[in-house]
Every structure is written in C-alpha cells, then in structure tokens.
Amino acid sequence: MGLTEWAYSLSESLLSEPLPRRWAHSLGVAKRAQSLSPILGRDAGLLEAAAVLHDIGYSPSIATTGFHPLDGARFLRDQESADERVVRLVAHHSCALLEAEERGLRRVLETEFELERPELVDALIVADMTTTPTGEHTTPADRLDEIVQRYGPDTVVGRFIQRAAPEIHAANKRVEGRMAAVGAQPM
C-alpha cells in the first residue's frame, strides 16, 4: 500500500464513525491539496497524505492532550512509524505553534517536531483554510470567520486563529503566486 492509500485508510478508520464531519473536512482538505500538485512536484503525494491525516488527533481513540496537532503527530510517530515529513506537517499544520502557545505547549511541540519545508507548510495551510468543516471549498477569510464564530472569539481556538490570520492570508498569497507562476489555478 502506498503512502496516500495508507493515509486515507488510517484517517477513515479514526474519523469516519466517531467524527463524520471531521472526516468530510479531511477529505476536502486532501482534495484541495491535490489541486496544488502543480507547485508540489514529487511532494504532491506527501502533502495529500498529510492533508487527509491532519485532524486525526481529534479522534477520541488517540486524543490525549486535547491539542489535536500534537496528539495526531505523536500517534503517527509512535504508533504508526509514519513518514517523518508527514508527521512534521501534521504536527505543525495551520499555524499550530500559535495555538500551542495559547495552550502552554509551544515548547513541547517545537522540541518534539521540527518544521517542514515552508512551501509545504504553506500548501497545507491553504488546503486546510480553504475547506469548510463539511469539505467544501471556501475562502480563507470565510474560513477564519467560521472558526471564530464556531469556537467564540475569547476561547483558546478563537484567540489563536485571530492571531494566525495574518500568516494564513500571507500563506494563501504565496501559494496563489506560485500557482500563477506555473500557469495553474487551484480548483
């Protein structure tokens, strides 16, 4: 079984029954990641695998700290011996260091997991932040608004996502620029 097939199977086993909406979101993020393949080259499959796995830390069967990037990355590393680059992308997806800081876990996340290449980090941010909770395409601005409304502006997630907004928009601009440079548009 290849990396992406394994990733889809694992994510489905962890999310589809206990968290069907999170599973739909993960499928949508993977689809968005596929649309960025013109700028990813040989890392396209790697990003797609990370995209479908990025939220597995929400699964009740593996959640331990309540911080899904850390829980998912630890599970992938410790239980699945997953590709190190996939693990790093899951650990740091969508500005996770900022949320880790809000939770008092920044040092833990930084110590356990190195950052992946910036182009891949940007691509995963864009895939995640242009996908609704039900897997549909959206804009980064609408996605950010939805997250703040869902969690509340004064919650850990609400505060973190508001702090992360400038970097999310900057990542989107960088990805759009790379896509335009190769004459491609994300789907």
Image: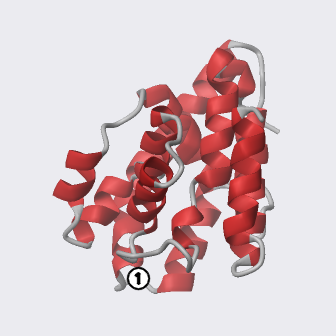
Residue at the spot 41% in from the left edge and 32% down from the top edge: 116
Type of amino acid at the residue the image marks with label 1: Pro
On screen, 45 above or below 6? Answer: above
Mark 1: secondary structure:
loop
Viewer-side residue, 80 vs 21? 80
Occupied quadrant, residue 20? bottom right
User: Please, is residue 109 above or below residue 146 in the view?
Assistant: above
Image x and y of residue 87, in percent: 47, 43
Among the 4 quarters of the image, the one containing residue 104: bottom left
How crowded is the residue under tag 1: few (<14 C-alpha within 10 Å), some, or many (20+)? some
The residue sitting at 48% across, 60% down in the picture is: 72
In the displayed structure, 183 sits above or below 132; it is: above
Task: Return the x and y of residue 150 as percentages of the image width and height.
Answer: 56, 84
Q: Quadrant of the C terminus?
A: top right
Q: Nearer the viewer, residue 144 or 109?
A: 109
Residue 143, image x and y in percent? 61, 64
User: Looking at the figure, which quarter contains the N terminus?
Assistant: top right
43 relative position to 171: left or right: right
Q: Is residue 35 visible?
A: yes
How many marks are shown on the rendered structure?
1
Residue at 38% across / 56% down in the picture?
Answer: 96
Mark 1, residue position: 153
Q: Is residue 168 left or right of residue 186?
A: left
Residue 37, given in percent of the width and then of the height, sits at 73, 26
Residue at left offset 76%, top offset 53%: 9
